[in-house]
Amino acid sequence: MRLTDRMQRLGTETAFEVFARAQALERQGRDVVHLELGEPDFQSPDSAVEAVAAALRGGMTKYTTSPGLLELRAKIAEVEGPRRGLRFAPEQVVVTPGAKPIMFYVILALAQEGDEVLYPDPGFPIYESMIRFAGATAVPYPLREENGFCMDPDYVASRLSPRTRLVIISSPNNPTGGVERRENLARLASVLREHDTWILSDEIYSHFIFEGSHHSIASFESAHEKTVVLDGFSKTYSMTGWRLGWGIMPQELVPHITRLIINSVSCTSGFVQKGGLGAISTREKTVPPMLAEYRRRRETIVSGLNQIPGVRCALPKGTFYAFPNVSSFGKKSRDVANYLLEEAGVACLSGTAFGNEGEGYLRLSFATSMDKIRTALDRMHDAFGRFQG
Ligand SMILES: Cc1ncc(COP(=O)(O)O)c(C=O)c1O
């Protein structure tokens, strides 16, 4: 088969590959604890299910407006703006099937051959994949453990060039659980004032912060006019399979992102958007208990990991991921992750699935039950004890 050159540049998400390998082991009768997928284990809110059922019964089965139902866009602006100290017009909100399309569209719309895009390493693997697919040069900036997995805004500034068209920020960060400090964001916003560059701020874990609070770079005046905020329903409302996400962006970008929607998916399913409205309406009842449960799991998994000789794990400040340092074993992270899957029946990801800076680390999702987390810890304790360093 002859594929286009751009297809050679397209990456993937290792999580789905590890998931498939874990399932293959399960088919052979092995018991596997799944800590590889970033998928909340809670039920989607009843309010969402009921709203969808009502919408479907009411005949809401047709195409709908491409940037999203105005009612949902208005609700997102009303709820999500003030959380970030911002006021947005409903027309600045664009709704998509999941949050990933916002990433895809924004990168396609703003970056091409000859352009550079800065992105966090470790970071969500789709950033690099999409930047390269768009033909632009992917320029990583590191998030280091000794810095609380936060960016160094001066380093980011040093990587800016006249060709930089977009800077991607991810806070809270998948995979490290790092949360950007307000002063770092302020510093970066002020540096970017001088540059003709856009910002894509991936805030999909913004509701899951354990220490301090969420800050968006969009809240700084110098960044406001050139930032796209990406967020959605997958994590906040445990609605991964519904495919519902959104971006809030300067008005001038909206028609272009809308054209990309028209050219690809036409619109986001109307009844799913009604489900999103249902989920938002009960957010005060559903989100805090999830956060409290993640907090308990975070304590358990991090203290358990730190009891394993050779493993060191910092407390993640946000998300539902632990990012332990396993470099003392002197093996490649990928080999460590493979060993844990094959020998201990614990599926997790190598830090390198998120970039070169992830070498020496593993990513473990704690969006799973406390029982499974305890089982995984016991198995890892034994397996690491037998591990030849
Ligand atoms: C950092 C980050 N951004 C975006 C997404 C995509 O979210 P969605 O499932 O809504 O497309 C994910 C999903 O894992 C993520 O971890």
Image (cartoon, grey):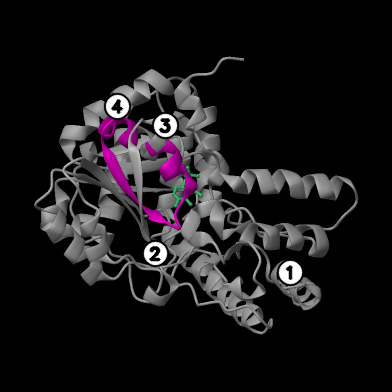
Query: Callout 4: helix, strand or loop?
Result: helix
Q: Earlier in the sequence, mark 2 or mark 4?
A: 2
The residue at which mark 3 appears reads as 133
The answer as to whether callout 3 falls within 8 Å of ligand 1 is: no
The residue at which mark 1 appears reads as 376
Q: Residue furthest left?
A: 194
Q: Mark 3 to mark 1: distance in Å?
A: 37 Å
* Viewer-side label of 2, 1: 2
Question: Where does the image place residue 192, in percent across and percent down from the top left?
Answer: 15, 53
The answer as to whether callout 2 falls within 8 Å of ligand 1 is: no
Q: Give the range drawn in magenta.
A: 106-131
Query: Callout 2: helix, strand or loop?
Result: loop
125 in the magenta segment: yes
Q: Which of marks 2 and 1 is nearer the N terminus?
A: 2
Q: Residues within 10 Å of mark 4 (few under 14, many from 20)?
A: many
Q: Mark 4 to mark 3: distance in Å?
A: 20 Å
Q: Mark 2 to mark 4: distance in Å?
A: 33 Å
Residue 93, quarter of picture: top left
* Viewer-side label of 4, 1: 1
Tag 3–tag 2 contact (CB < 8 Å) = no
Q: Which of marks 3 and 2 is nearer the N terminus?
A: 3
Q: What residue appears at the point 29 percent right and 67 percent down from the top-left corner?
A: 152
Q: What residue appears at the point 66 percent right and 66 percent down from the top-left corner?
A: 331
Amino acid at the residue labelled 2: Leu
Question: Where does the image place residue 330, in percent across and percent down from the top left?
Answer: 64, 70
Q: How crowded is mark 2: few (under 14 residues within 10 Å), some or many (20 or more)?
A: many
Query: Callout 3: helix, strand or loop?
Result: helix
Identify whether 46 is placed above or below 261.
below
Amino acid at the residue labelled 3: Phe
Q: Looking at the image, which is closer to me, 19 or 46?
A: 19
The residue at which mark 4 appears reads as 258
Residue 283, quarter of picture: bottom left
